[in-house]
Amino acid sequence: MAWRWYLTAGLAVVGAGPFLPEVVQQAGYTVLGFSVLGAVTAGLRVHRPARPLAWRLLLVAMTVVVLANAGWAVETALGVEEHGVSVTDVVYLLMYPLIAACLAILPVQGRYGSRFAGMTEAGVITATATVLTWTLLIDPLVSDTGRLPIDAEVVAYPVLDLLILAMVVRMALVTGMRTRAHQLIAGTSVALLVADTVYFVDVAGGGDTGGSALTVAGWLLANTLVGAAALHPSMARFGATGPGERPPDRPVSLPVFVLLVLLSPVLTAVSLVSELRAGQLGLLDVLIPTTATMVTAVLLVVRLGQLTGVAQRRAVDLEALRGELSHRALHDPLTGLPNRTSLQQRLAEGGGALLMFDLDGFKDVNDRYGHPVGDRLLTEVAARVTALVPDGGMLARLGGDEFALVVPGDDALEVGAAILTEMRRPVDVQGRQLYATASVGLRRLSGPDAPAADGAEDAEDAEDAVRDADVALYAAKAAGKDCLVEFDDALRQEQLVQARTLDRVRGALAVGAFVVHYQPLVRLRDERIVGVEALVRWPTAGGMVPPDAFVPVAESSGLIVPLGEWVLRRACRDAAAWHRAHGTGLSVNVSPRQLAEPDFAAVVLRALADAGLPPAALTLEITENVLVGAGRRADRAVGHLVELRRHGVRVALDDFGTGYSSLAYLRDLPIDEVKVDRSFAPAGAEAGRRMPLVRAIVDLATALGLKTVAEGVEDAATADRLRGLGCDLAQGHHFAGALEAGDVPRLLTATGAAVPR
């Protein structure tokens, strides 16, 4: 705010100064001059400018002004009359080169081309101003040789103003004037130019050499603006280099530039003709305006050359940008491979085969190590597979960890096998050995290079080919991953069936068409019912839809989450009454997709509370693939289970003995029971071979303090063998099949069951 107060006070002096007596004017000059010195000194100390030398030169210039004002006051007090150039005039004139030097040392910013262009335009403006000053002001005065001694110092003022003007124009065009300090200093030069020009005109007309009101106001204003600029905070950035001070790369507007260029020769011609007619044409009359005009012409040619170069460079830059945008539109930014658009263009050519593959377990890598490691893995995979691309082929990245490879000819199976082999090798990323096998889908393309696949049309759509290859890819994942599956009519039909099934599941869920049946869980030592397992069923007009016909579709589509929550809530409401009457427990199957939800534990606890079923009466059945892979998803699932067990909910590991069957799961998963898969409890001769395995599982579970539940018990002999092995619970048609909810109470009452597990 100090600069505002200073500027306000200074403008008051500017307004009143011209109308005060000469003695008071001189005192005002002196006081204002000392205030400027104080302002510049304070600005240097407080704001610490990036270019202190410029401000120090300005401080010296203003010191010279103060000394000159003092000399003028002394001459006036002593009544010294002016005869020619005085010492005071010489001191005043020293201020101009000092201000010009202050502006000259400012660094020029931007690219070299823009700096040179700005200086060229500054030169054109200055040369034109020189012609104007000479023809309109100086030449009429110097023609009167009788007044030359005093006119020499008078002429020097506008000439030196031209020097300052050149520096200001350079600053405006090259360095920029984005700060208030720049603008105030530029205003100083304008005030000096106007005041000195008016002073020159006054003297040329025989006026008072002390200066008119406008002259005095201009000189006072110049001093005031310097002080305000020094106090403004932006003086710290005066002339500083940095991105915030970079001027725009644009030339002087074309009409202004053309006017300036035409003005010099026109004025020169008019002046020469006028002097010639008056018979006063001298050497200086020809030399100065002609030289300035020639300089203008040379600078014009230089500037036109610069503009031509700029146009050429911009054309080259635009072409390069067009090429870069085209490349970006057709390529993946991470791997540099062609993208989906490029792939579609290549597929339109037909022929060969399309391989689509993605990385098994890539999400686990992202979850555990972060996306930067995942990106490095993708780039390494792209590099490896690129080495396998045959001549005429194209490898593209479609997004995420999904890639596509167009293989010409009949070598698709061999190339696919090579990809599988290559991806089985570990990938070293930032010192980590990462393993990410691939699942590959193959789709033959019709065309001259290869026969069409079964059912393929002669003219194929690229999107159809990508879709079919994607279906084969997911069939490879369903087949166990790390394998190749070729698309055929059977997969096409399976895809259509799954799509129709998905639509039907979605509709059935919306209208509440699903029901829950319950299969009893029996304690083997006394064959009493201690619980029931909730099983989702889908009755339709055509009969009951088998669970394996719709549950996998719901799982893959994510519909298993709302379906599973509905089953949980329904089963809790049904089981609450049975638990109150008989102490019967409830088991509910939980999908890995449900466990991946961030609010799963809260959903379970809310369902229990809403139904009035104690948490200890509920057992959640999970499968081993909850921990298949790694990362935040598995950690979240385990976290949910730990939280629920803390509230009393029990956890059972379902289908133990199938899948991965790692003993580490018994250690890592928070479980209370192990359910032995039905394949280990067969009847007949097969039972003799399987029972040793069941014994091992039961003994292991017992040693770990876990209960065992046998599934699929179909006859009394199997039940007796399991009882002899120490198995705790069993379920199967030997005891009871799946019952509707209305039949469960009658069974519980008839058997006299139950006691809590």
Image (cartoon, helix red, strand yellow):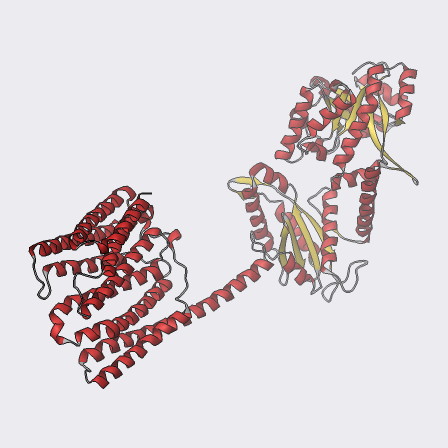
Out of 623 and 616, give the one closest to the viewer: 616
Which residue corresponds to the image point at 70% horizontal and 32% vertical from the top-left? 595
Residue 170 shows in the view? yes
- Is 12 on the left or on the right of 578, as rendered? left
Residue 680 shows in the view? no
Quadrant of res 140: bottom left
- Is 163 on the left or on the right of 557, as rendered? left
Figure disc tally: 0
Locate the N terminus and report the quarter of the image it occupies: top left
Question: Eyeballing the image, is 32 above or below 740?
Answer: below
Which residue corresponds to the image point at 23% horizontal and 86% vertical from the top-left? 277
Question: Eyeballing the image, is 130 above or below 664?
Answer: below
Out of 312 and 190, give the one closest to the viewer: 190
Out of 644 and 30, give the one closest to the viewer: 30
Q: Report x, y in % for residue 246.
A: 38, 56
Q: Report x, y in % for residue 20.
A: 21, 53
Which residue corresponds to the image point at 71% horizontal and 64% vertical from the top-left? 350
Out of 110 and 15, give the one closest to the viewer: 15
Locate the C terminus and report the quarter of the image it occupies: top right
Quadrant of res 405: bottom right
Q: Report x, y in % for residue 663.
A: 68, 27
- Is 46 on the left or on the right of 649, as rendered? left
Quadrant of res 647: top right
Question: Eyeballing the image, is 580 above or below 393?
Answer: above
- Is 581 on the left or on the right of 317, as rendered? right
Q: Report x, y in % for residue 519.
A: 86, 25
